[in-house]
Image: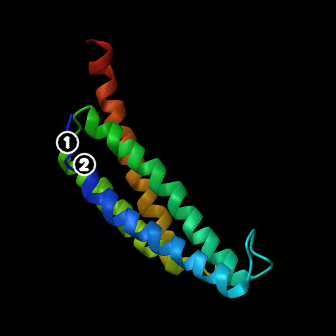
Amino acid sequence: MVFTVTPLYALPVAAIYLILWVRVSAMRSATHVSFGDGGNIDLLRRIRQHGNCAEWTTFVLILMILAEGIGSSSLWLHICGTLLLIGRAAHPFGMLADNAGDPLRYVGNGTNMLAAIIAMVCIGAAVPAMLNG
């Protein structure tokens, strides 16, 4: 099976992941903190931006790969990928220490949750056909 949709979104999301990782590494170097956050709120924010990206990206891309692998509609896969990309681009800018309700944080979480749900529905819709052979 050749995957043609999911990789289109995996690549830019991986670039976002790497940018967030570089930001953590750069701040670790600047603050001389090898492990944890050293009580530095800015480093903690960058760690969580990167961690949240890793958590959601892995989850949604696995669901997308599964959905694509069982032949789900490319339209729905593109919708999932677009939502994932929007969420991963918006979320880090919404993670503020003094404002847990920043709109970009809601956009990030909401779009990624919606992408996951759509992929889950795509997978769930194919299950009856797979069970019946």
The residue that disc 2 covers is: 76
**Quadrant hosting residue 14:** bottom left
Q: Residue at x 52, y 59 (%)?
A: 54
Counting from the top left corner in percent of width and height, residue 82 is at 29, 62
Answer with left or right where residue 69 lies relative to residue 107: left
Q: Which residue is drawn at 56% across and 63% down?
A: 52
Q: Is mark 2 on a helix, strand or loop?
A: helix
Q: Residue at x 38, y 53 (%)?
A: 115
Q: Could you tell me how far apart the alpha carbons at marks 1 and 2 are, in whole angstroms?
A: 5 Å
Q: Do the residues labelled 1 and 2 touch (CB within 8 Å)?
A: yes
Answer with left or right where residue 95 lies relative to residue 83: right
Residue 97 visible in the picture: no
Residue 61 visible in the picture: yes
Task: Tell me the crowding category of disc 1: few under 14, some 14 to 19, or many 20 or more residues within 10 angstroms, Cα based.
Answer: few
The residue that disc 1 covers is: 73
Counting from the top left corner in percent of width and height, residue 81 is at 31, 57
Q: Which amino acid does label 2 sit on?
A: Trp
Q: Is mark 1 on a helix, strand or loop?
A: loop
